[in-house]
Amino acid sequence: MRCEDVIRELAAPTGEPDPAAMAQHLAGCPECSGWARRAAQLEALWEATRPPEPAPEVWDSVWASLSRQLEDPAAVESLAPATAWSSRNGRSSQVLAHPAPGHPAAPRRTWRLAAITVLGLAQAAAILIALGLVELTPIHDRNEILPKPPLAQNEIPPGLPTPSVVRVAVPVRVEADLEEGPAVMIRMDGPAPQVVVETRPGMAAGIGRWSGVAGRRLLRIAGLLRAAGIEGWSVVAGGLGGAAMAVQEPAPGVDTWYVMLNEMESLDIPRIAAR
Amino acid sequence: MPESLTTSVQTPDELLVRRAREGDAAAREELFQRHRGDSYRVAYRQLGNEQDALDVVQEAMLKAFSALGDFDGRSGFRTWLLKIVTNTALDWGRRRKRRPNGPAGENPDHSPDPAADDPARRLYQQDLRRALDQALGRLTPTIRSTFVLFAEAGMSYKEIAEAQCVPIGTVMSRIHAARVKLQADLDWDRLNGLS
């Protein structure tokens, strides 16, 4: 058995590999046996730190509060704090309503897009983002858009070349929870910057290696854009994994200066390259 | 006289849900009592704080009982509820920074600590818990929630995939990533005594 197969099985067991073959490999591979030892230590630590169950009276208080809210939702606002814990109940209605700060409930939509859909939506439904115009906030499995007031004009550096993608020094803040391997398209030549992220669950990581699945998909997207005559978009790498580094290898039609690290909640983008 | 054998049969969750939808308060309370422990442990592992975990349990249960009509029974009630708990904890964590329990990681008065009679053991357990909480805090929320559902709630890959609306392969990748990072981040030399 190969080490990567053994470690994969240790990390997320499937029961498929032959146990005897696993044992034989572990007996002869110090690295894998060390990994197995640390995995066992982690499991022991997890068991040793299992959170103790709250006292029965705490649960009684939780249920009493919950019952009141279920029977009379309007009573949530008037709950008087009786203990240090129940004083939090006054927040419940606000928390449940999820109001966007300073705004009424904003229209929300998912934005997991297939490659062809990305092209179709490029001119019409691209996601407005960054420079503070819109903030993407990941909620559950969706990336939802909370509109924010537009920035004042003087916050955008003057004299930027148009209409092609411009190089700007204004940080672009993105909060997104991306699966591995999404492609990111950025367009800066419009009235507002536009970012479209194409996500496809289960894509392999490794955009730095252009022979990888995600790398080939980026090249295909770049080719499709050129073939369709859609100008102004930069196709960049994205979603390289928690320990991803910047993509350095050049590839036709793909800007490699920029990396969006997946599994990060926020990322300041210092620059966007010009064509 | 031979002893009579008695077996207690637990009312299935689906039946309790049906009764709760019809306004049966006792059924609702039974569901709460049956699933509060799992919900609390999942929320606690996500947030690392007992107060926050209790708040999340209450909020998630409120959402669940208010939306019982949306439960279609395709997944088990427990899977559906723990999805709500996880998502509520994720939202909670975004609104509030992850914070440890009280001063020096001590438990507040909500939980009876089995190690209360042994101060040395209590400190050791607090040390262990703090170390793991900090390591969990360094995982991204998605990775952390996936691992918690696997390790704490004991959900299968399929159940987690249904709860998170991702393929099973993605679930396994996330669990793998969590283990790699946790095992690398934890100071095993300091956490001696574990094997």
Image: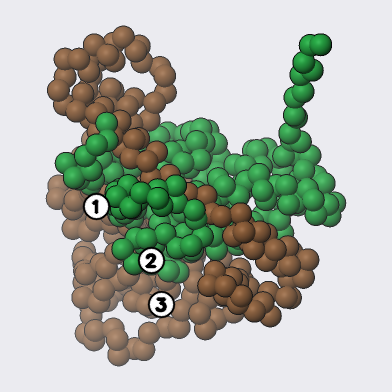
Chain colours: A brown, B green
Callout 1 amino acid: Val
* Disc on the earlier residue, 1 or 3: 3
Q: Of the residues tagged 2 and 3, which is closer to the observer?
A: 2
Q: Residue at x 67, y 50 (%)?
A: B32
Q: Nearer the viewer, residue B29 or B88?
A: B29
**Residue B178 visible from this viewpoint:** yes
- Residue linked to disc 1: A254
Q: CA distance from mark 2 to mark 3?
A: 38 Å
Q: Residue at x 68, y 80 (%)?
A: A78
Residue B157: percent from left, percent from top: 48, 33
Report helix, strand or loop for mark 3: loop
Residue B140: percent from left, percent from top: 35, 53
The disc placed on residue A202 is none
Q: Residues within 10 Å of mark 1 (few under 14, many from 20)?
A: many
Report helix, strand or loop for mark 1: strand
Q: Residue at x 42, y 19 (%)?
A: A15
- B127 with respect to A109 (left or right): left
Say yes or no: labels 1 and 2 on the same chain. no
Quadrant where the C terminus of chain B is found in the figure: top left
Residue B8 occupies quadrant:
top right
- Residue linked to disc 3: A133
Residue A198: percent from left, percent from top: 41, 52
- Residue linked to disc 2: B102
Q: Residue at x 49, y 67 (%)?
A: A145
Q: Is residue A227 above or below residue A232?
A: above
